[in-house]
Image (tube, coloured by chain):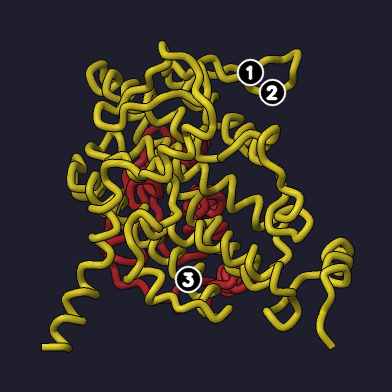
């Protein structure tokens, strides 16, 4: 089930760039317990202007996964740096002129 | 050997891009600078206009979203001014020493945004206008440095639209807030229609389009904007003075347009019937109530530093 949840999260894109929240390195863990999907989420900065939109997109996508009735997002505020972006994410950003 | 107009136009027609001023003619560069100044001023002045209304944000996350948008807009302005500087324009003088009335941003920003509701409608309407206009530039511009810079700008404007739409949805669920939303839509919708400028029947774009500075005409761009703005409002149960006419295959404006506008009351005087575009141009030239306040907000720090350095 956790793998299914991660797969779904790979389809949730950053509101500005077409990089998923997984490739951006924002997802710090997923768990599943009796119909509830739990996501540990960090942001690129404390002042991220898109927190509400990102959470809304994650919630909406996970609710479409079979067996998920509820979504719990825990904001963990773990430090994030550009190092956390996957090679695939880096390539997409590079193509858009973001380095 | 100097580049002739004909040789340049031939290059542009064959789809080649202009990499810098050394590959263009004076006439091309003058047109490009005019277009860039409008774009830069629009992005720049949107920042203080949005910042004023952001003070009314309903919670801290909403405030952070609004200031994130403002930061983006300043970044976009910086890109356009930087391109102008590379063309030899004194951008410090342009930004900090011009009279407020000489700025080229759309009249809409000179009508103050005073509430969170008005701010999110501005994100959904004005940023959409910017998105339509810059999207057209991105697809059609012959000036390569601008085209490359716009990739990032377009992505960010997407977030602004989303923010505006999302908040309009939230506000539309509350009956009192919905009334406020309708009131904002009533004055801002037509003001955004005006943003796209003179109708094609009165304006010849031959130079701008031939030189590849824009692709679509004013009327086509106005239609592009309505194509997404009208369905958004209809979905939220908000009335807009325009509808899709299947027989014509386009949107039709249901009120006298252009019309007289009471900027203090933020009200259209449709009952007075349509006015001429010359009258609109006169209103634009006189600028609106917030013009000086917005420009001064940008110029204040510069003036202080200059005074301090002289003392």
- Considering only order in the chain, which callout, 2 or 1, is on the residue closer to the N terminus? 1
The numbered dot on residue A32 is none
Mark 1 or mark 3, whichever is nearer to me = 3
- Considering only order in the chain, which callout, 2 or 3, is on the residue closer to the N terminus? 3
Residue B237 at what x, y percent from top left? 43, 16
Q: Is residue B132 visible?
A: yes
**Label 3 CA crowd tier, 10 Å (few <14, some 14–19, many 20+):** many
With B47 as the anchor, is B225 left or right in this view?
right
- Considering only order in the chain, which callout, 3 or 1, is on the residue closer to the N terminus? 3
Q: Is residue B157 above or below residue B112?
A: below
With B306 as the anchor, is B121 left or right in this view?
right
Residue at 44% over, 33% down: B191
Residue at 49% over, 72% down: A85
Q: Is residue A86 above or below residue A13?
A: below
What is the chain identity of the residue bearing mark 3?
Answer: B
- Total number of numbered discs in the rendering: 3
The numbered dot on residue B81 is 3
**Label 1 CA crowd tier, 10 Å (few <14, some 14–19, many 20+):** some
Q: Find disc 2 in the rendering and name its residue.
A: B250
Q: Are marks 1 and 2 in contact (CB under 8 Å)?
A: yes
Q: Which chain is red?
A: A
Front-most of B283 and B16?
B283
Q: Find disc 1 in the rendering and name its residue.
A: B244
């Amino acid at each position: 089930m956790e793998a299914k949840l991660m797969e779904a999260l790979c389809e949730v894109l950053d509101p500005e760039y077409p990089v998923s929240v997984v490739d951006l390195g924002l997802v710090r863990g997923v768990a599943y317990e009796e119909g509830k999907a739990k996501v540990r989420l960090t942001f690129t900065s404390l002042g991220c202007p898109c927190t509400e939109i990102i959470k809304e997109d994650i919630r909406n996508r996970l609710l479409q996964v079979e067996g998920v009735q509820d979504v719990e997002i825990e904001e963990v505020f773990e430090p994030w740096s550009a190092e956390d972006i996957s090679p695939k994410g880096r390539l997409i950003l590079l193509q858009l002129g973001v380095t | 050997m100097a580049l002739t107009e004909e040789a340049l136009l031939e290059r542009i027609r064959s789809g080649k891009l202009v990499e810098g001023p050394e590959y263009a003619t004076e006439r091309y560069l003058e047109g490009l600078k005019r277009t860039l100044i409008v774009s830069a001023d629009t992005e720049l002045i949107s920042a203080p206009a949005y910042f004023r209304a952001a003070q009314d944000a309903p919670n801290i996350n909403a405030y952070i979203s609004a200031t994130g948008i403002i930061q983006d807009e300043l970044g976009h302005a910086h890109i356009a001014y930087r391109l102008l500087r590379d063309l030899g324009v004194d951008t410090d003088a342009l930004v900090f020493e011009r009279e407020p009335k000489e700025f080229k941003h759309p009249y809409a920003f000179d009508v103050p945004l005073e509430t969170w509701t008005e701010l999110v409608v501005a994100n959904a309407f004005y940023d959409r206008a910017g998105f339509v206009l810059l999207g057209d530039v991105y697809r059609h511009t012959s000036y390569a440095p601008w085209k490359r810079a716009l990739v990032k700008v377009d992505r960010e404007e997407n977030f602004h639209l989303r923010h505006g739409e999302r908040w309009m949805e939230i506000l539309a669920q509350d009956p009192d807030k919905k009334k406020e939303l309708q009131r904002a839509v009533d004055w801002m919708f037509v003001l955004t229609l005006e943003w796209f400028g003179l109708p094609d029947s009165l304006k010849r774009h031959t130079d701008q389009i031939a030189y590849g500075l824009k692709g679509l005409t004013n009327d086509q761009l106005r239609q592009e904007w309505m194509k997404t703005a009208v369905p958004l409002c209809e979905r939220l149960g908000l009335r807009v003075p325009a509808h899709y006419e299947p027989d014509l295959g386009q949107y039709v404006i249901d009120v006298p347009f252009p019309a007289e506008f009471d900027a203090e009351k933020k009200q259209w005087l449709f009952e007075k019937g349509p006015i001429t575009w010359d009258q609109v141009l006169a209103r634009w030239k006189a600028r609106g109530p917030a013009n000086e306040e917005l420009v001064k907000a940008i110029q204040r720090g510069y003036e202080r530093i200059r005074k301090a350095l002289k003392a």
